[in-house]
Image (tube, helix red, strand yellow):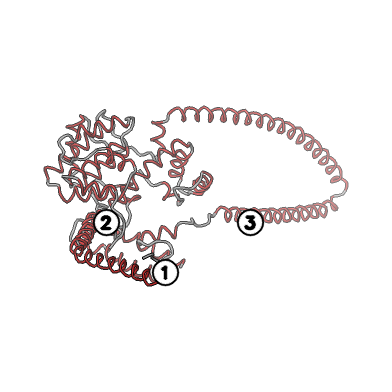
Amino acid sequence: MRDLYQRLAVSPEANELEIKHAVARCQHSALRQDAESVFAVAERRDAYDTLHDTVSDIGRLRARLGLSHGAHWQGDVANDFSLPADHAISRHDELVDRVSHAVSLYNRWRRLRGPWLLIAVFASGAGIGLALGLALCMGLLPM
Amino acid sequence: MSIARFSPFELLLLKSRSQVDTATLLLLAWVLVHRQHVSEGQRRRRLAQVTAQFRHGHELAPVMSIAHSQDLQAIQLAAEVVRKECGKERCLSVIHQAITVATDDGELSLANHYILRFLADLLSVAPMTLNTLFKELTGTPLATPEDPSRDTYWQTHDPDYHARKAREAAAAEQQHQQANARAEQQQRQKEQRDAQKQQKQQEKQQRQEQARQAREQEQRRHQESERQRQREHTEREQQRSRRQNSHQQGSQERRNNDSRQQRTSPPPPDRTTRALSILGLTPGATRIEVRHAYRRMAQLHHPDRFYSESEHQVALASARFQRIKNAYDYLMQTY
């Protein structure tokens, strides 16, 4: 399994005309024949694209998991679909980080709930009292 | 600290009673999704059947939907969990389950070829072990996957198309032959005409010869100068024709040059993007960033670092290093 798009230097989303031009431009006769037979029929290109997506997904996964030089990853596939290791953080570590963050937020909320509730009750009581006093002063309430 | 929400799979993992089981479940579902000629209900039933022993304690439907959406991050998380938590025994059993799920009817799809090998690498199962396990479970040895990027694959898998094409080619060949035959006939007629013309010319020459012989007998002295003049004339003609030939050749060469220049292709547009991605950069990186990335990558992938390991590793590293260096050279030229 080779990455024909990479070898022909076209993007996988290229339309038929661009691919035809790229194939015609190709200097390598064997590669040109292969590319012609794959891209000549729409169904073949679809089948090839599905597999291409899966294999490039696997290449990305291998790069992230540090498996781009495994015993089962050799030959054409490894040559064409290996990506350079990116500096993506391990998903599991990230999950653990996020869970611990959420836990600390939750704990803080629990710890501060008592005092904050008291303050909130006082504040609301004072507010209501002030409003009533103001209304009385203005003579708005019928007494 | 990221403020992203927990993804569906992360929530599932947090709620699960056994994280390993949930992660394994997702990997098996991923294998099942890439199996061909199976209905959705069959997939779900098969997954439930295989994972009857698991202690995850949640529904299978969300796992299947995540696997269908090809969520790469979820699969990466599952792979990390499985790698972290599995012992040697458990690794083998996971591979075992993956093989059975992938090949109930003996047919291993192309995508699953690569997925199974990825799982084997992930769980550090050696190729020998994988091969024997596969043979025990399915009765056939694990073949190398077929290559749909080659012409031969399509000739075996799509013979109708090739038969049709061969027929068309034969028809075209026949037409070509007919055209050739017609051309040959015309050629022959032309040759006959030429032969007639030549005959006439020869007769004319003979007549001239006779006339000259007659003149020879009369005036021998004049004839010498005559011949001289004729020779000069022919020489001049030859020279002129030679000059014309060289002129024609020159123009032909010029035309060839023109066509060659037209044929040379413009450089592929995404080469810069590819070179940047080799250095782990995104499009729009500055020259300084390129240089820093190159230094880092070169230190990381230098073949000398792998000297203590196997020769194969050194060869791989030098291939990588060469790729990185090519990308850097190209970027330095264009930037």
| Same chain letter for marks 1 and 2 | yes
Tell us which disc is closer to us: 1 or 3.
Answer: 1
**Could you tell me residue B127's position as x and y percent?**
20, 43
Looking at the image, tell me whether mark 1 or mark 3 is earlier in sequence order: 3
Badge 3: chain ID:
B
Above/below status of B74 relative to B171: below
Instruction: Give the x, y percent position of residue A67.
Output: 24, 52
User: Which of the chains bears the disc numbered 2?
Assistant: B
Residue A13 spot, x, y in % from top left: 46, 47
Q: Is residue B89 left or right of residue B220?
A: left
Q: Secondary structure at mark 2?
A: helix
* Residue at x 52% of width, y 27% of height: B167
Label 1 resides on the chain identified as: B
Closest to the camera, between mark 3 and mark 2, is 2
Work out how far the residue at label 1 is from the one at label 2, CA to CA, in angstroms. 31 Å
Mark 3 residue type: Arg
Crowding around mark 1 (Cα neighbors within 10 Å: few <14, some 14 to 19, many 20+) is few
Residue indicated by mark 2: B315
Q: Do we see residue B125 in this rendering? A: no
Q: Which residue is tagged 3?
A: B254
Q: Amino acid at mark 2?
A: Ala
Q: Which structural element holds mark 1?
A: loop
The residue that label 1 is drawn on is B286
Say which amino acid is labelled 1.
Thr
Q: Is residue A113 above or below residue B231?
A: below
Task: Give the distance between the C-alpha atoms of the residues marked 3 and 2, in whole angstroms.
Answer: 46 Å
Q: Counting residues from the N terminus, which is met first, the one under dot 3 or under dot 2?
A: 3
**Residue A76 located left or right of residue B270:** left
Marks 1 and 3 close (CB-CB < 8 Å): no
